[in-house]
Image: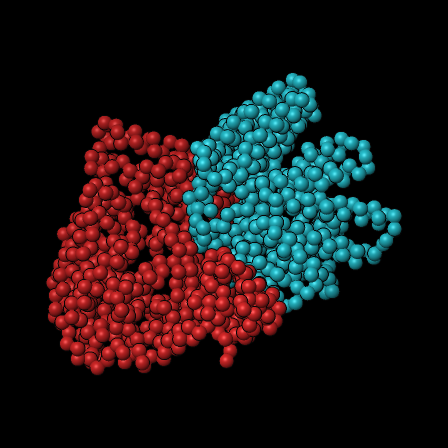
Chain colours: A red, B cyan
Amino acid sequence: MACFATEHDPMKGNVFYEWVAVRASMGMAVLGFALLLSYMALGHTVIKGIYKSHFSIVDQIMEARKSTPIESYLSAADEGVLKLGSRLVLAGALAFVILKNPLGVLFSGASFLIGSFAIFCLLDMFPAFVKPLHLDIIPYFNYRLTYVPDPMLGFRERPFNQSEIDNFRGFAYSPVYGIDVQPRTMTWQTDQNGFRNPPASSLADVAVIGSSFVEYGSDLADTYPQRLEKKLGGSRVVNLGKAGYGPLQFLEVLKRYGLEKRPRYVILAFYPPGDADLHLADFTKGRVDLSLAKRHIAFGGFLPRYRIAVEQVWRMLNSGWWTVLQVGFRGIVGRDFIHPDVAVLRLPNNVMEKVIFLGRHAEKSVEDLLHSPEWIALEKILVSFKQVSEQNRIVPLILYIPAASEIYAEYSTSESGVNWLKYRDTQIATIKNNEEAARQLAQRVGIQLINLVPAFKQAAGQSKLVYYRLDDHWNSEGREIAARVTAEVLQTLSSMAPKTRARSKSNDTESNPQLESILQQAKADLRGGIMLRTLDGKINFWNPGAEQLYGWSQREAVGKVSHDLLRTQFPEPLEKIDAQLVKTGRWEGTLVHITRDGRRVVVESQWVLESQGQRGSVVEINTPVG
Amino acid sequence: MAIETLGILVGVLLISYAARFVPATQSRQCLLLAASYFVYAHWAGKLALLVLIGSSLLNYCWGAVLRRRPTAALLWIGIGLNVLLLGFFKYLLPVAEHLPPLSSQAELLQQITIPIGISFWTFQGLSYLFDLYREEELNPTLLEFCLYMALWPTVLSGPVCRLPKMLPQFRNRPDGSISEDFSIGTVRIIQGLFMKLVLAQLLAAGLTPDGGVNAGFDGVAPPRSGLDVWALAIGYGFQIFFDFAGYSNIVIGAARLLGIRLQENFDRPYLSLTPSIFWTRWHMSLSFWIRDYVFLPLASVRRDPWWPYAAMIISMTIFGFWHGASLTYIAWGIYHGLLLLGHRLCQRANKRLQLKLPHPVGALLSWANTFLLVSLGYIFFRANDLGQAFRMLRAVIEPRSYSFDYATLSHDYYLLVAVMVVGYFLYVGLAQLLVLWTTRYREKLRATAPPAPALRVATWNMFSCAALCTERTVLENKWWWLTPVFVLLLMVTTLSVFGQSSNIAPFIYTLF
C-alpha cells in the first residue's frame, strides 16, 4: 500500500501531507515516552519542591495547599501523567501504523475478529478449558460455569457446585490502593438447591434469606448462618442467601425453598446500599435488575453472548493493564502517595486503618427515604413476606445490616484521599437516617427488626474492623457479632413464645429417613472394626470394634501395616484395588482376614479415601459376614 | 508473578529501551546497569544484590591478576573462590536447613536465602576467568564487566552469556533496524509468555484439580502403572520445555528489544534424532558451557581410549549437580551421561556391523528412541526422592503393570498430554512448512521475469495468476494475519496471569 502512495502517485501534495502526518504521529508517541521517562526521573522531586516553596503563584495553583497533604498531589500527578503519557504513546503508535498501511490494519482487524470468534466458539464447545486457563475472572465465563437460568429468579447456582478460589483478597481488591490484604483460600460447596449449605440439608429451625452477606465466608463454618447455628446450639439454620439476589428474589426464595424447610423463624437480611439503592432502584426505574441481568449475560443468544464476552474481556484487559502500569510506575517513582478513594481511619487508642467505603449509605433524610420508590416497593415486598410467613406459622424477622460508612465514617481523618473527603461531611450528617427509616418501616409492617448498628459501633469503639478493608462485605468478626446478636434475639423470642406448634424435635427424628440410616450405621459399626490407615496400609487408628473382631489391641495394631497384620486375602490384586480407590475415592468387597488366634474371618469391607493435602488416608470399615 | 513485579518490569523495559537512543557509551551502560540492579534488588532482595556485586568485583579483580600471569595455579584459585561462593549459598544452605536449630549459627544460616540466579552468573564469571587463562583478548572496564554479570534480562535464569559476544554489543550502539528488533522482540516475548504462563501452567495444574503433572507426582498415590509413568514423563518433559524455553524466549525477546542479541537456548530439542544432538539443542547456553569448560579440558587430561567416556559421564554428573544439592539431580546427570555413552557405543558397533535401515524408518526409530529415553530421564529430575523415581521406573519395566486396571491418572490428563504433544509437533511442522513455502515463493519470483502485460494472459493462465496473487498477498504481508494471532495469544496469556494474580506456581528454573 505504501508503495502505491510513494512511487507512482503523481499528487505530490498528498505525499507531503502524508509525510507530515506520519512524522506528527511519531512525534506524539515520542513525546509521550519522554514525558513518562522524565517524570519517572524527576516528577516527585519537582512537585515536592513546589509544594514547599513560598512563591505566591503556587498558592493559586495549589489552592488548598495548607489543608491537603502532599500525598494527594503526588497521587493526582502520578495518575495524570501516566494517563497522558501512555495515551500519547498509544495514539501516536496507532496513528503511525494506520497512516503507513491502512489496508493492512483493516485486514488485521478482520483476522482479529475471526480469531476471537473462533476462540469464543471453542470455549463454548469445550467449557472444561475455561477454569484451567483462569478465564473465569471474566464474569461471563464464570456465570456460565456456575449458574443455571431460572424464569423467576433470573439465575440459580448449580446444585452441588464445588469450587476453590486461591489467593482471594476481596471483591474489590486492587494493588492500586496500596492497602495490603492477606490472601485467603475460599472453599465453596452448594446443596441440592444451589445454596451454600452442607450437602443434603433437610429441615431447619431458622432460614436466613439474603444476598452475598448471607452467603459469603472463607468456608462453610465461616458463613453467618453457620455461625448462628453454632451460637444457637442444637437448632439448625439453613442458608438461603445468594450473591446477586435482591428483595424481589427474597420473596420467591422464601416460597420455593424456605417453606419446605419448615422453619420456625425466617430472617431477611437487609443491606440498604445493595438491596434498596441498587436492586430496587433499578427495578423501580424500569431497568433490568442485577439478578435478571446475570441471566441475560450468561444465557442469551449466541451473538449477544459473543458481544458481551468481547466487551468484558476488553474491560478486564483495560483495567488490568492500567493497574499493572499504575503499580509498576509507582514502584519506580516512589510509594509516597495516597489513593484518592482511600479513607484513613483513626480508631480509639490511635489504631490507624486504611479502608475503602465501597458501599456508602444513601444521603437522604428519613422522610425522603421512606417516600422514595425503592422503599415503597420494599414495603410492599415486606408486607407479602410477612403474610406468606404467617400463613405458614413462621415468625419473620428483619436483620438490618448497616453500610460500613454508617459505622466508620466518623472515624475518618482529613489525611484521607480526596475522593472520600468529598463525601465525608454529607455521609456523617446522614449517618443515622437509613437505620431510622428501616426501624420505622419494620414497625409499620409489623416485623421485628434486629439492628446490628449498636453492636458494630461497640466493636468499632474497641478499635475492631467488622468489614473487609477493600470490600463492602462484613468480615469474619462482623459475621460473628451478627450471629451473636441474632442468637440473643432468637433465644428471647423462643423463651417467650408459647409452645403451640405441633411439630416437636422427637417427631422430626423419627420421620427423617436420613437420620435413621445414620443410626443404623452407627449400630452396625459397633459390630465391625474401623481403622484409619495410610494408603500403604500403616494403621493410625483402631477402634474397639476392631479390637474385639481381630483380637489385636489398639496399642499393638497402630503403626503396623494392616495387610500384613491381618494376612489379608484380596479378591483381586491389591494394586488394582488401590487404583480404583484412588480413581473413584472408594472400594467395596469381601476380604478374608486372619485374627490374632489364627481364626479366619470373612468380612464385608468398605474403603473410603480421604485426601488431606498431598497425603491420603483410608477409612476401612470391616463388617463380619454372618 | 505479582502484578507489581509485572508493572515494574514494564517500566524498566521502557527505561532500558530509552537507553538504546543514548549516544554516549558510558551513560548508556550506566543506565542499563542501574536498571539491572534495580530489577535484581526488587526480585532477589538487597542482600542478594550485595552478593552479586561482590562476585562481580571479585571476578573482575582476579581477572586482572590472571591477565598479567595466566598460570594454572591462579586459575584454580579463581575457580575455587567462585565454587566456594556458589557452594556456600547453594549447597550448604539447604543442608543447614536440615540441621536441628541448636546453635546460633544455624539460626543465622536459616535467615540467609539463596541469591536467585547465583548459579547462572557465577558460571558467567567463571567463563571470563577461563577465557583469560586461554589468553583471549578481553579488556572490559569494571562497568562493562558488572553489566555483563547483571544484565537484567539474563540475571535471573540465564541464558548463560559469554563476554566475547557481549562486549562489542555493550560498546557499540545497537546497529540493527529498530522496527525489526521491535517486531522480533515482541513476538518472542509473547510466544514465551504463552508457553510459560499458559501451556506449562496448564500441564502442571491439569484440566481438573487432580489431573495435572503436579498431582501425578505429588498426589495421594505414587503411580504404579507403566502407562501412567510414561504419560507423566512425557507430560513433565513438555511442561519443563514450555516453562524454560518460554522463559528463554521472553529473555531473548526482551534483550532483542534493547538491541542486544543473546545466544539461543533451545532449538526444537524434541526433534533430535540422537541424545548427543539433543544436548546441542536443549539448554544450549549451559550445555555448551559444560562442553567447552568442563568436558573438553577434562577429556584431554589422559590418553586412555576409555577416558573420554568417563569424562563425558563426569561432565554430565556435574551438569546434574549444578541444578541443586539433591541426589535426584545427580542421578539425572548420570542417566544422561550413560545415555550419551550408550549412543557412542551403539554408533561404534553400527560402524563395524554396517547395519543400515531404510532412511525414514531408521530416522523415525532413532527419533522415537531418543524422545522416549529423554522423557524417561525427567522422572529423576522431577521425582520427590530417589525411591519414588526407582519405583516409577520399575513400573515401566514390569510388563504386567501395563494393564489398564492399574492406571490411576484421570482421562483428562491423558487427553491433555495428547493434545499438547500433537499440537506442538503440528505447530513445528506448520512453521517449517511456512518457511519452506516462503523460500520457494522467493525463488519462483526470482526465476520468473516481471509479470507479463495483462492483455496477453490466456484463460488457462488466469488461474495460476490468481493463485500467485493470493500467494503474494499471504506471504508478503504475513503481519496482516500473524499480528492478530499474537495479539490474541497475548490477550489469553494476560487474562490467565490476571486470573492467577499473585499465585503463579514457583517457576522451576529460578530455583536453581
Location of residue A261 by image quarter:
bottom left
Q: Establish if B192 lies above or below A591.
A: above
Q: In this view, does B375 lie to the left or right of A157?
A: right
Q: What's the residue at 76%, 54% (across, down)?
A: B366
Q: How far from the left and from the top, in percent, is residue B164? A: 64, 30
Quadrant the C terminus of chain B occupies? top right
Q: In this view, does B148 lie to the left or right of B40?
A: right
* Residue sitting at the far top: B68
Q: Establish if B77 lies above or below A473.
A: above
Q: What's the residue at 17%, 65% (across, down)?
A: A489
**Between B72 and B452, the one nearer to me in the picture:** B72
Q: How many labels does the image show?
A: 0
Kindly tell me whether residue A373 is visible in this rendering: no
Q: What's the residue at 48%, 32% (across, down)?
A: B49
Q: How far from the left and from the top, in percent, is residue A322? A: 40, 48
**Between B475 and A181, the one nearer to me in the picture:** A181
**Between A74 and B251, the one nearer to me in the picture:** B251
Q: How far from the left and from the top, in percent, is residue B477? A: 61, 52
Q: How far from the left and from the top, in percent, is residue B216? A: 56, 58
Q: What's the residue at 57%, 50% (across, down)?
A: B384
Location of residue B359 by image quarter:
bottom right
**Between B315 and B134, the one nearer to me in the picture:** B315
